[in-house]
Image (spheres, rainbow, N blue to C red):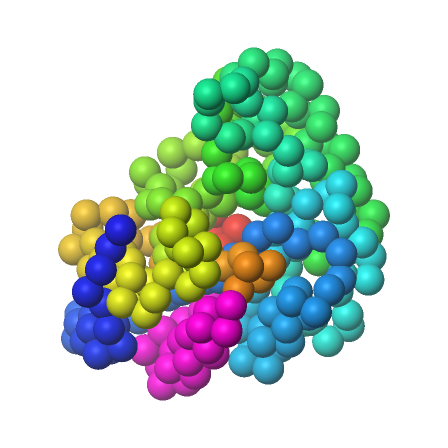
Amino acid sequence: MMDGGSWQSLRDELARWKDAGRVADFWWRDDDAGGPNPLVRRLLDLSCSMAVPLGLAVIPQDAQADLLDEQDVHVSVLQHGVAHRNLSQPGEKKSEFPATETPAAAIHRLRQGQAQLAALFGPRVLPVLVPPWNRISSPALLPLLPTAGLSGLSRYGPRKRMGALPGLVEVNTHVDVIDWKGTRGFVGESVALGQAVAHLRARRLGEVDAGEPTGWLTHHAVHDAATWGFLQRLFECTVDGGMVVWRSPAELLAKG
C-alpha cells in the first residue's frame, strides 16, 4: 500500500506539471449504485455542489429510475456489470465474467444490462463497462465487448496504452480511497494522496500512459465521515486555481 503523500506533495507535483507547460487532469468514478438512498444522494449532491463530473457505475439489475434527479447534471451512468454476482469457481478470484462462461453468454447478458440502463436513464448512459471487482477473467471476452454495444472500459490500475484494446477506450482509476484489506473505511490522507502523486509523477515522466487521466475511485455505500471529509477537501483544493482539470466520462470517451 502506497504511503507518504500529503497535500503539499500534491501541490508540488501539480506545480511540476505547470512548470512543464502541462495541466494535470483527474476523473471520478463511484461504484455499486442501484436505487436511491441517503448515501448515494449525498454523493450526487457533492458532485452537484462542487460541479465535479461523476461517472456513476450502476448495477443494471439493481437500477431504479429515481436514482437520479434533474439536478444531477454532472452525472453519467456507466454499466457496472449486470448483476454484480461472483460467477467464478471456488478458490478463484471474484469475477462476474469468468473464463468458464462462454463469451456469447456474457455478451448476451451485457446487452440486456445495457438495455435496462438505457430504458431507465436514457442519454445519461454511456457505453462504458465497469466490471465488478475491476476484473474480467475471460480473455476471450475483451475483444468482443464492442459487439455488446460497449465502446469504453474502466478498471483499476494504469492502462497499457491508448488503443491497446481495438474498438475500446480504456480509462481506469488509480486512487482507491477505501481500505478494503483493513478497516474497510477511509484509507487515510497519506495513502490516498500518495497514490495520486505517484500516478501523476509516473505520467509526467512517461513511465505510464501520460494521456490517461488520474482516476479517483469511491464507493459511496461504505464511506465514513473521514472519507466524505477528504473528498470535500480534495474538490475544494482542485476545482479552482487552474492546476487541475476534472474530466467528464463523456469527454474521455470522445477523446478515444
**225 or 108, which lies in front?**
225
Q: Residue furthest front?
A: 183
In this rendering, does residue 135 appear at all? yes
Q: At 61% across and 14% down in the image, what residue appears?
A: 102
Picture quarter containing residue 37?
bottom right
x, y percentage for residue 132?
Answer: 56, 39
In this rendering, position of residue 123 left or right of residue 79: right
Q: At 72% across and 24% down in the image, what residue appears?
A: 108
In this rendering, does residue 153 appear at all? no
In the rendered image, the vertical position of residue 125 relative to residue 21, given as above or below: above
x, y percentage for residue 196?
Answer: 30, 62
Residue 248 counted in the magenta span:
yes
In the rendered image, the vertical position of residue 251 relative to residue 22, given as above or below: above
Picture quarter containing residue 216?
bottom left
In this rendering, position of residue 227 left or right of residue 111: left
x, y percentage for residue 115?
Answer: 78, 40
What segment carries the magenta color?
224-249
Q: At 34% across and 66% down in the image, what residue appears?
A: 188
Q: At 82% across and 62% down in the image, what residue appears?
A: 66
In this rendering, position of residue 205 left or right of residue 97: left
Q: How many marks?
A: 0
Residue 74 counted in the magenta span:
no
x, y percentage for residue 96?
Answer: 59, 30
